[in-house]
Amino acid sequence: MKKISVLGSTGSVGRSTLSLAGLNPDRFRIVGLAARRNAARLLEQAQKYSPLAVALHDREQAAWLRQQLPGTPVLEGQEGVSRLAAEVEAEIVVAAITGAAGLIPTLAAIQAGRDVALANKETLVMAGELMMREVRDAKVRLLPVDSEHSAIHQCLNGERQAQVKRILLTASGGPFFGKSLRELSEVTVQEALNHPTWKMGPKITVDSATLMNKGLEVIEAHHLFGLQPGQVEIVIHPQSMVHSMVEFVDGAIMAQLGITDMRLPVGYALSYPDRCNLPVPSLDLFAMRPLEFHPPDPVKFPCLRLAEAALQQGRTTPAALNAANEVAVGLFLEGRIPFPDIPAVIEGVLDRHRPRDPESLEVVLEVDRRSRLEAHDLAVTRM
């Protein structure tokens, strides 16, 4: 039986992980649960799955949770989440805490020798070189949970990297595919959160609307699969049935198809190199709509261009990109800046950034801190 800790258990990926574990009690046991907030949901999960320990980033809520779970250790703060990731004896840690907050606990799990199922793309965007070096040093596996990177992982299974010509990362296009620049200038928060295919948290849903989600995934794929920046391309695929494709040097293209259910990529990561039985419907090929593929529009969606430029520039530039994006998206969700200001704030931060070598976690975190302050300053001048 494989023992699993889940960082970000109250979010969408975390809940999918727990659902999958509940469907396969003979294969998986939940030994650790951690979340940033939402103590009430974490309490329900702890009562259902009886983990060895839980952790809550929010200290005040952790005190309340400790009273509700007298027989279970309740760790608190970022250090508590990191301790759970490193010290609870799990064979694999699902890293699903959204944003930069997931970096330190994920790194702690790797350094403790835990395999990691990675659902936090920001970790590799911020500190990809550092993270992959730690993965190699610890001799652990970093298994992708994003549906697109899981698809690539499956297509590359048994293949040699030298035979890969390019990767085709598919994107649904988000809720605003086909809208004009004028229409994009007037979109509301509610419209941005109305994703046509996936049910996700607010931050990643807005990233999908700006296509920054795909830009971050290009950077993530670069690190995960050891590819050059020019080997990763974005393809708009509104039906979300083809999760991604790999083209090989002989011109053959291998694709992975499936229904839009996060339990599939989560199950593949947890079971790898095996697969687990899932009670999900088969993809009905005869009922499928025609499959469409379109190039992205970098004028309407400049976040793609900004992410690709950050990858080309390298060093700490992707960390600055990620920090600026998190701040800008947060301000948009609060209704403080309009939708087009998201890429404008990010570009302003990147224009100011002076890249450094990301030789340590401290350097990456300092770039993250400074870029967040600059993003706030730039946003204020636009309000």
Image (cartoon, grey):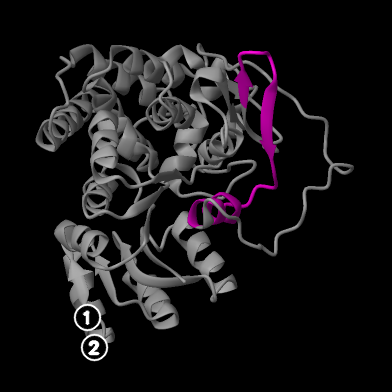
On screen, residue 59 versus residue 109, left or right, reads left
Q: Which residue is disc 1 drawn over?
A: 66
Q: Which residue is disc 2 drawn over?
A: 70
On screen, residue 99 versus residue 28, left or right, reads left
On the image, the x and y values in percent for residue 320 come to 24, 25
Please tell me how crowded label 2 is: few (under 14), some (14-19), or many (20+) other residues with Cα within 10 Å: few
SS for callout 2:
loop
Q: Quadrant of the C terminus?
A: top left
SS for callout 1:
helix
The quadrant in which residue 286 appears is top right
On screen, residue 178 versus residue 97, left or right, reads right
* Magenta region includes residue 268: yes
- In this view of the protein, which residue sits in the foreground, 275 or 152? 275
The quadrant in which residue 368 appears is top left
Please tell me how crowded label 1 is: few (under 14), some (14-19), or many (20+) other residues with Cα within 10 Å: some
On the image, the x and y values in percent for residue 316 come to 21, 23
* Magenta region includes residue 5: no
Q: Residue at x 30, y 62 (%)?
A: 37
On the image, the x and y values in percent for residue 242 come to 68, 34
- In this view of the protein, which residue sits in the foreground, 308 or 238? 308
| Magenta region | 246-270
Q: Is residue 67 above or below residue 231?
A: below
Q: Residue at x 53, y 37 (%)?
A: 153
Q: Which numbered marker is on residue 105? A: none
